[in-house]
Image (tube, rainbow, N blue to C red):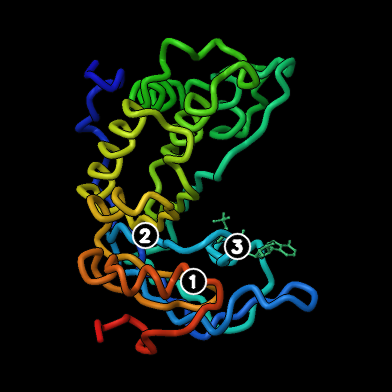
Amino acid sequence: MNSAGAAPLSALQPKVSGPAIEFAGVSLSLGRTEILRHIDLQVAAGDIHALVGPNGGGKSSLIKTLLGQMPHQGELRLHWPEAPGVIGYVPQALEFDRGLPLSVEDFMAAMCQRRPAFFGISKRFRAAIDEALDLVGMQGKRKRRMGALSGGERQRVLLAQGLIPTPQLLVLDEPMSALDEAGIQVFERLLQHWRAAGVTVLWIEHDLAAVGRMADRVSGLNRQILFSSTPREALTPERLLALFSTHPRSTDHSPQGQPA
Ligand SMILES: Nc1ncnc2c1ncn2[C@@H]1O[C@H](COP(=O)(O)OP(=O)(O)OP(=O)(O)O)[C@@H](O)[C@H]1O
């Protein structure tokens, strides 16, 4: 265990090769509302790519589009190194009724295995679930009901379920929003681990300091892509002002956002 309450990362986690992602002219309208306008965006294989922007700017809609949950126009391509692999998804939050008799390990079993969770964790996933709960510092709370966990503890469990089976592409929707300092350390270690393992990570985040520390690339989205470059080039006061101003105005028309 370390200061973040989590076990060290296992050297057993396999090296994987994540896919590159390409959005080409992707648009999304729901009813009469235009949610995404002609998105051209490339995420390189194995990159940690952050998506930043104001509330309602379309970040969650973009990843739901990627996950096939939204009807869209335009082209969306995943360039897998070999055969299509595993996509992991960590949602923004999940609510559980306090009285729901679903423990942390029941939840992990329900998310990871086909066998119904009330039969217990299958042998095949036992070691992986143990390791994932260790990694996020939740091993000691595996018998707790999901509805009785704090927001940060629930977030750690959501991260743990995203680890099984080992994904090649991981999509994270504000994974740090409820985490305390120790939880943030756990998450930062996981990011380092995914980077070393070659996983492609698409990561929605509001904490721009964390993005500056940990992302390889960052794209600004407010209905349209306003920039896409390294954190150093992207996180300038001018660009952030343009991104977070009420009316989106494109400051950079090149798909990969060469700085002006
Ligand atoms: N199913 C839907 N039907 C109609 N409008 C929707 C639907 N889902 C999302 N929207 C709208 O699309 C816009 C973008 O929402 P989205 O959740 O993608 O934004 P976001 O950038 O992830 O926001 P936040 O930072 O607040 O999480 C919002 O105005 C939202 O109200």
Q: Distance between the residues labelled 3 and 2?
A: 16 Å
Q: Which residue is drawn at 33% across and 65% down?
A: 218
Quarter of image, ligand 1: bottom right
- The kind of residue tagged 2 is Ala
Q: Residue at x 24, y 61 (%)?
A: 216
Question: Which residue carries the number 2 mark?
Answer: 50
3 or 2: tag closer to the N-terminus? 2
Answer left or right for 237 relative to 223.
left
Residue 254 lies in what quarter of the image? bottom left
In the picture shown, does residue 91 fall above or below 34?
above
Question: Which residue carries the number 3 mark?
Answer: 56
User: Foreground: 249 or 102?
Assistant: 249
Name of the residue lying farthest toward the bottom: 253
Look at the numbered disc 1 and give the secondary structure of its residue: loop
Question: Which residue carries the number 1 mark?
Answer: 245
Look at the numbered disc 3 and give the secondary structure of its residue: loop
